[in-house]
Image (cartoon, grey):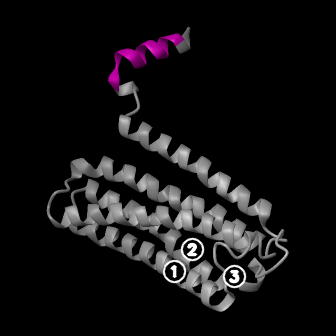
């Protein structure tokens, strides 16, 4: 009976219903999680099954990956600070923290580009070299594409703020965008663990 009463209240009172924005964002994140899970499983399944190199242990460097990871994880804190600043009406604070978020995301993407350049030039590793190359570029590239999309959207919000088009009333919408950014950060934990710790033997 209690469950029935709650359902009736939810139908009668719009305040009981989750917002469309939150529901849509949650569904998007759930769908993207499925895709990332597939890529991670495929990477772990095929790693170590190449008959010819290079192997992850031979060409992946842990130090730069850790630095880029710290930058990406730190950006989760700065985007939260940006949302809070907007909610309290501090446009300058929002632009500072959002700008820092964009900088950290840009550093991460630059690190990925530098790593790929080194893998191609120094180790001749491309997406068609072997199974490692195929799964590595697919997984890390898929994640980098999501980071790029996030940087573009966050950059648009920063620009709108500069133009005076963001107000405290927009804080909830900006927070939904931050959910996506947090999701990208959380996914990197699994990608980093699979690519730079498990397949290189650090967690053997």
Vertical position of residue 70 compared to residue 41: above or below: below
Looking at the image, which residue is at 61% across and 47% down?
A: 34
- Judge whether residue 174 is colored magenta: no
Real-space CA distance between mark 3 and mark 2, rounded to the nearest whole angstrom: 14 Å
Q: Which of 83 and 147 is in front in this view?
A: 147
Magenta span covers which residues? 4-14
The kind of secondary structure the magenta stretch mainly shows is helix
- Judge whether residue 11 is colored magenta: yes
Among the two numbered marks 3 and 2 on one chain, the one whose residue lies closer to the N terminus: 3
Looking at the image, which residue is at 56% across and 67% down?
A: 141
Q: Mark 2 points at which residue?
A: 69
Vertical position of residue 151 compared to residue 52: above or below: above
Among the two numbered marks 1 and 3 on one chain, the one whose residue lies closer to the N terminus: 3
Q: In which quarter of the image is the C terminus?
A: bottom right
Looking at the image, which residue is at 57% across and 59% down?
A: 186
Q: Position of residue 197 (x, y in %)?
A: 74, 72
* Mark 3 neighbour density, 10 Å: few (under 14) some (14–19) many (20 or more): many
* Quarter of the image where one finds residue 98: bottom left
What is the number of the mark on residue 73? none
Looking at the image, which residue is at 52% across and 11% down?
A: 4
* Quarter of the image where one finds residue 52: bottom right
Q: Mark 1 points at which residue?
A: 113
Depth check, mark 1 against mark 2: the one in front is 1
Q: Name the residue under label 3.
A: 60
């Amino acid at each position: 009976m209690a469950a029935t009463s709650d359902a009736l209240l939810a139908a009668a009172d719009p305040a009981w219903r989750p917002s469309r924005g939150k529901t849509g964002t949650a569904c998007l994140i759930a769908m993207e999680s499925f895709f990332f899970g597939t890529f991670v499983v495929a990477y772990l399944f095929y790693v170590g099954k190449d008959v010819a190199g290079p192997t992850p242990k031979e060409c992946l460097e842990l130090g730069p990956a850790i630095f880029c990871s710290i930058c990406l994880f730190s950006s989760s804190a700065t985007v939260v600070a940006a949302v809070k600043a907007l909610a309290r009406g501090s446009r300058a604070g929002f632009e500072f923290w959002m700008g820092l978020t964009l900088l950290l995301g840009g550093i991460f993407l630059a690190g990925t580009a530098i790593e790929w350049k080194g893998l191609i030039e120094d180790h001749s590793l491309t997406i068609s070299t072997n199974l490692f190359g195929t799964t590595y570029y697919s997984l890390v590239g898929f994640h980098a594409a999501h980071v790029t999309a996030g940087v573009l959207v966050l950059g648009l919000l920063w620009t709108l703020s500069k133009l005076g088009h963001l107000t405290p009333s927009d804080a909830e919408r900006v927070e939904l965008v931050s959910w996506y950014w947090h999701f990208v950060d959380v996914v990197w934990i699994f990608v980093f663990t699979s690519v730079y710790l498990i397949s290189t033997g650090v967690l053997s």
